[in-house]
Amino acid sequence: MAKQEKNPDKIGVLTSGGDAPGMNAAIRAVVRSCVYYDITPYGIYQGYQGFIDDKFEKMEAGSVKHIIHQGGTVLKSARSADFRTDQGMEKAWKNVQKHDLDALVVIGGDGTFSGALEFGERYDFSIVGIPGTIDNDIFGTDFTVGFDTAVNTVVEAVDKIRDTATSHNRLFFIEVMGRDAGFIAVYSGIGAGAEEVLIPEIDRDVDKLFQSLERTSQRKKSSRLVIVAEGESKSVFELEDEVQQRFGDRYETKVTILGHVQRGGRPNTADRVLASRLGVRSVEALMNGRRNVMVGVRNRSVTFTDFKKATERKPEMDDALLRIADIISI
Amino acid sequence: MAKQEKNPDKIGVLTSGGDAPGMNAAIRAVVRSCVYYDITPYGIYQGYQGFIDDKFEKMEAGSVKHIIHQGGTVLKSARSADFRTDQGMEKAWKNVQKHDLDALVVIGGDGTFSGALEFGERYDFSIVGIPGTIDNDIFGTDFTVGFDTAVNTVVEAVDKIRDTATSHNRLFFIEVMGRDAGFIAVYSGIGAGAEEVLIPEIDRDVDKLFQSLERTSQRKKSSRLVIVAEGESKSVFELEDEVQQRFGDRYETKVTILGHVQRGGRPNTADRVLASRLGVRSVEALMNGRRNVMVGVRNRSVTFTDFKKATERKPEMDDALLRIADIISI
Amino acid sequence: MAKQEKNPDKIGVLTSGGDAPGMNAAIRAVVRSCVYYDITPYGIYQGYQGFIDDKFEKMEAGSVKHIIHQGGTVLKSARSADFRTDQGMEKAWKNVQKHDLDALVVIGGDGTFSGALEFGERYDFSIVGIPGTIDNDIFGTDFTVGFDTAVNTVVEAVDKIRDTATSHNRLFFIEVMGRDAGFIAVYSGIGAGAEEVLIPEIDRDVDKLFQSLERTSQRKKSSRLVIVAEGESKSVFELEDEVQQRFGDRYETKVTILGHVQRGGRPNTADRVLASRLGVRSVEALMNGRRNVMVGVRNRSVTFTDFKKATERKPEMDDALLRIADIISI
Amino acid sequence: MAKQEKNPDKIGVLTSGGDAPGMNAAIRAVVRSCVYYDITPYGIYQGYQGFIDDKFEKMEAGSVKHIIHQGGTVLKSARSADFRTDQGMEKAWKNVQKHDLDALVVIGGDGTFSGALEFGERYDFSIVGIPGTIDNDIFGTDFTVGFDTAVNTVVEAVDKIRDTATSHNRLFFIEVMGRDAGFIAVYSGIGAGAEEVLIPEIDRDVDKLFQSLERTSQRKKSSRLVIVAEGESKSVFELEDEVQQRFGDRYETKVTILGHVQRGGRPNTADRVLASRLGVRSVEALMNGRRNVMVGVRNRSVTFTDFKKATERKPEMDDALLRIADIISI
């Protein structure tokens, strides 16, 4: 990691990929840190697409006033097929030169970091990444910006569903986000007091569910909630179907797919604090000559992970939590 | 309506049909009013099924402590096929005699009131109803217990979806509850600032949607939210499909079905106050010899509607509100 | 009320006095209705002070995008001493002429309407008012914009306080807003299940409180919440003091003053719908030649009340609700 | 730390000191873990006072159903002067023998652990502690149960106050809990985007505030929020007073004391997950022969801290966060 010879004068910031609550707090922290260190911040709209299409806007401290508590991203986000082409990258590089940008902060997930890695290497350009995704599926940080809020959104929804499940003695299958990772499912399952959690990381958890339903259908339990990560091998509808066939006489079943509500909403404090911290540290990292790294928090300290590692490896599911979930759902 | 010769000594209360936030506040008010007027209250569990199966429990003021803010119903609810049979009704009547019950308060929707009407007439028994359903589809009251909370739950969810819709410039179809009535859709559509609302009461609103999409696809509008009542002639998936075929090049679409979260949750103040008012007045109505009526609130005053009328007629959709919705979604 | 000869071409809108949740929804509806009817809307910043200081801004439909769910007022508010002087009024009138404004919508409380009445009469200028205040203390409308949200904010806070009160068996005095009117106290008292409510409209309610404490200190009741309107004859601290002197051996007391949190927050659906409705109808009223009136909702219909009457009379406290509060706090 | 020769047969659990959101999740996890490991759980009501007064209740898995999301503590809490006397301890010890209790889990703060330490040593009795307090002021754990919820409650309240502060261009002083520790103030200050945070750990932060007010009163900043921990050297009212004297012509000031709302409310997911984890591990610790230790989480792993150390040392304020707060409030 080469030390830059001088401080950056101009730093851009963009959000890319799926939006996550807290992205605005991160943008705000990047912009304010730039102002604090006499660097000119540029907001780039609509992710890498705007990077290509020259949607740059010079910012100041006031540009990010009253956004810390807003969901979504004021810079908007988009997936960009163009950025995977040579022409796209070339156009973006021309914009960097045109605006005389010294460095870039990208906020997003592993797709975002892959793009950053390629662009940074190709043009010898300094980029630092902030993990912003509700899925918590990024290696190199204990938590991603947006995860805590998403999990709380799920738990609030499941608390409501429990009201009606309990009133009617029903078995609910609730699908939550997490195509590759079951973090949202596990945390919200424990938080909501769900009876079962099904995640892609665990094989044969469906068998375990059926055994548990067999067992509890003999004693009396007023209602049951099963949280299913969308990446689970069977869909919620397939699961409901099988349960109907096997246990239809003993359980009345319902399905709820929580969907896009999980992406939005006012960010919780943990996400605002995490985003603020990473925003400040990403700018300071660039000032210290860091590049092609993602800034994260592990064990309450800020850490840096090479983009390569951050995109190639996956964080491990916490077995201790799975065990906790089993014990208290007795 | 015959005046009873003496005050009731014992009054039962049950919740029936789909649960709704605020039912607990109504139960609490019925029980506390009984205590206030020296009447013994009996809670009956699991609706008409528990009425048949003798799930009666004597209550006192403390039995309903700290339930005013809880969603669902502590008395549980159930649909009962048995109550539509002669044997079922006969069993329930035996329980009434066994516990020496003088009258009953039923909390639910029009199915609940139909059952009450038949039972009340068959055995010359006094029943008063409280409208408890999130759909607001009961004739004889401005609002039903649960509607305000459900609408706010929808609007909170749509506020979250707007965050992500705006960040990505997407068109969202959001299905809300309301099989026969579009009240939830219209109120939440106005409240959430949705661009379009589709309800069963209005023909050809799908055509209007397509015209509007045609028009706005030419100018720039960052995101669009369409609220669809579940009773609408086309499902959200059919709608999405048609929009994809016609406008797939101009709009990226997503579907969210809010589902059972709409039934649960802490009741809002309006529902708690309404439920408290109707709970007190239902007991007082029985004391005054009223029977076979639903107690509601119209124009801020308590009114009574015969069960017959309450179940045969439907409240009208408020055209003034539909007009408002059109004007401000410009 | 003279019928205008032509439709207004330009309408201004301002917010004045204490801010209330839902004011943004009202501004949005006024602006959008203007656009809908081909009228040019002008936002005037900082209430009557900006009216004097020429803080006018031409608006369009997009100016009020994504504000329906925001608390506070994007037009800001201020109390203006200048507007009570001849020079202040004269300056404001010059601005009206300069911008060629045909009419004005003011959103606020009775102080706002008094100013509007005087200005409107002095310069023969058309003004319509929208009741926007959390206190619900305006004659001529069932509810003011902001009341429902404020009451729910109070009830959410009291629900939290009840958690801790119950855990410790404490007596809490909770002061809520309402200098002249006890509406917030009564609605939130019923909604939160408070044991007592003290409001300025009722004499001797403190005596009643002491009797009740005397009575219940003999039987066991785990915790007690007393809601006190700020306009009550005794302050919460005086009340706590007296209770300590008389019942200090039997009750552990605590005081909470909810304060300014009651003014803020995302408006609830009821306030958004009410504000949208009144916003549209205020513009239509001006188009129909109405002037010097407040637009309100009574019995679910829109009504008009002369500014004179709206400022001179006070809405009556709902005795039926006070009775309900007494019965269910048994 | 002596290894017990046999597994405990009966374990008691109590909550003591100020209540905190998540205590119920901890109780639930302790009870369920006992059931899972064939240990009989006993709930002890009203903290050490109930320990003395023999308020023991045998529990089972169903006893803690549907409490994970409730604020406060179903076991109630109390401060007990009696437990600091020989007679009190002796009575409690008799109850332990009477019920044949093998061990105890106490949930609370450092006062709770001091009592546990003395009792455990005096009678050679096994006690494990769970840190439950909103203040986060316990050595030996990254976070205490209740802190995350309390901080989010504060931030939600400050978000509301910002609405009204912004609408009126006001300077607000907001007092939050934290007599000895500024954690709530710092986290909520960053999360709410407050302009200044005053905490007991930092000297001369009032001077810094005045300098900042001096500086910003010259440029235009629409509103300012100052978060003040209750342990700060000057009270919010003294601060307001001084600011009025020095800057009264430039700032309109307001004070809000958030008070007991900070203790209550539905626990957030982070607190539910933390409490569940610590609840399970406290029972397992007792099974493994641990005693006189507090179980906490550091760096995502469960750790044990001697009661002595947990009560004598204080966690350090995170300087990195203070620096972040400074930079982004520019």
Image (cartoon, coloured by chain):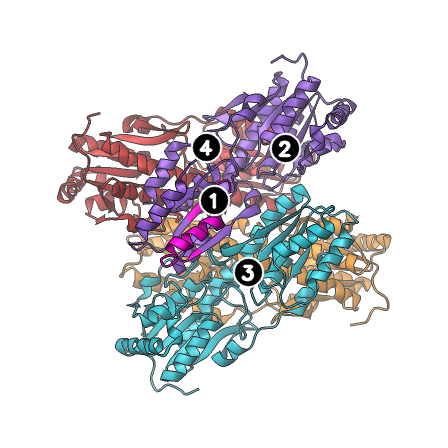
Chain colours: A cyan, B purple, C red, D orange
Q: Are marks 3 and 2 on the same chain?
A: no
Q: Nearer the viewer, residue A207 or A51?
A: A207
- The magenta stretch spans which residues? B226-253
Q: Residue at x 73, y 59 (%)?
A: D105
- Assess whether residue B243 is covered by the magenta stretch: yes
Residue A316 location (% of width, % of height): 61, 72
| Residues under numbered marks 2 and 4 in contact, where contact means CB atoms less than 8 Å apart | no
In this picture, is B206 found above or below A38? above
Q: Are marks 4 and 1 on the same chain?
A: no
Residue C115 location (% of width, % of height): 25, 35
Label 3 sits on residue:
A177
Q: Amino acid at mark 4?
A: Gly
- Camera-nearest label, 3 or 2: 3
Mark 2 element type? helix
Quick check: A280 left or right of C253? left
Residue A111 location (% of width, % of height): 46, 72
Label 1 sits on residue:
B234
- Camera-nearest label, 3 or 4: 3
In this picture, is A127 found above or below A217? below
Question: Which chain is home to disc 3?
Answer: A
Label 4 sits on residue:
C182
Q: Amino acid at mark 2?
A: Ile
